[in-house]
Amino acid sequence: MLAGCTALVLSLAGPAAQAGHRDPARQTLGANDGWAAHGTGTTGGAAADAEHVYTVTTWAQFKAALAAGGDAPKIIKVKGTIDAVAEGCEAFAAPGYDFAAYLDKYAPEKWGLEQDLAAEPADSPEGLRRASAANQDKAIKATVPSNTTIIGVGRNAGFKGASLQIRGVDNVIVRNLTLESPVDCFPQWDPTDGSQGNWNSEYDTAVVHGSTHVWLDHNTFTDGSHPDSAAPAYFGMLYQQHDGQLDVVRGSDYVTASWNVFTEHDKTILIGNSDSESTAAGDRGHLKVTLHHNLFARLVERTPRVRFGQVDAYNNHVVADGTYSYSFGIGKESQLVAEHNAFTLPAGISPAKVLKKWNEAPVTAAHNVVNGRPVDLIAVHNAEIPGETLRSGAGWTPALRAQVHPARAVPAIVDRGAGAGRLR
């Protein structure tokens, strides 16, 4: 038995266990429930024996449970809120690092906006920032192995400041967790980013990188106690300490994100991380993702932004506020199908903003409603934003869908059922 973790005695459930299993920790993705149901389906750790079922209450216990038993099926039950940065950012700071000195040295009026910081030595403010960032990187990332289910116990389980790394693995389930976005303690100032320079941060809340058969269900992704609205500005730019909430990148395939809440964030979901040909070679033919019955509330953009992938987004509810930029980003060689979704937009925000064209690629956007009324999102976009004309018809028809609700019914259904603590 793993030291520091408690094995629970539970009846075994094999890979064929159905989504309706009485123990939520042993539930598997239902047949036809999005791309993650393709082929072998997604069972996570449903087949775990008693020695590979753990209940964890601390970050150390959680990381130890992840490392135990290799790729043998395992279930990790998270009890309460686990803080990956409980000791504060100061615990990661390299000796001699001083933020005031960093601001003083790289102020645009002194440093300018043409010279980047890549060549700065290890003992410079930037070098010490890099060392500090490396300390945080090692501490807050948790690597998830194949054949794993991570599930919150009850209504108040989750992580603060953690980055779940689902890298190069197969068959992972993450459910019933409130995931407060990691705060980058040491963002980097890049003088060459844009016309005024910019602050760049690391650490996505969850990363699916080169992995297959991943099901993320009934989670709440939030900036929580560290919203961007409370962040200061330095050098005239927002001191951005957040990256994405969910990235699906580097040839990942067969991912379903269902019944989650994504809230209070800027760059929310990225599918395919680069237009470059070196990245495209591994992404073409992959990045098959389903997003259904998710609530996207008070977000700026990327729900999702797509490159290359065949992405099916249906029965989602988008609730916008004054920070809203767009929902669906149409990127390089993407084939997005966005159907039967509902959008609640405030006065002054046009439905033309729902779609954003980044590259020439076709899109299917049918049977959607805005503020309860049917709207042809492509037509209104093309009418109001003629410089970004979109082509209709993604070129494929989704076959793996759970129950599809009428778009008008989506707000009530999703708002009532999505998010952590509402797992049935």
Image (cartoon, grey):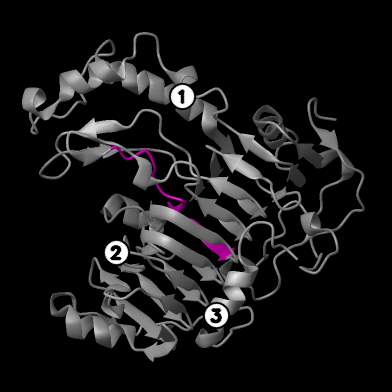
Assign the C terminus to one quadrant of the image. bottom right
Q: Is residue 204 above or below residue 397?
A: above
Residue 219: x %, y % from top left: 61, 56
Q: Amino acid at mark 2?
A: Ser
The residue to which callout 2 is attached is 325
Q: Quadrant of residue 320?
A: bottom left
Q: Residue at x 42, y 76 (%)?
A: 344
**Mark closest to the chain's N terminus, 2 or 1:** 1
325, 56: nearer the viewer: 325
Q: Residues within 10 Å of mark 2 (few under 14, many from 20)?
A: some
Q: Amino acid at mark 3?
A: Val
The residue to which callout 1 is attached is 89
Q: What separation in Å lies between label 1 and label 3 (alpha carbons)?
A: 41 Å
Mark on residue 410? 3
Query: From this viewpoint, is residue 361 visible?
Result: yes
Q: Which residues are magenta?
A: 239-257
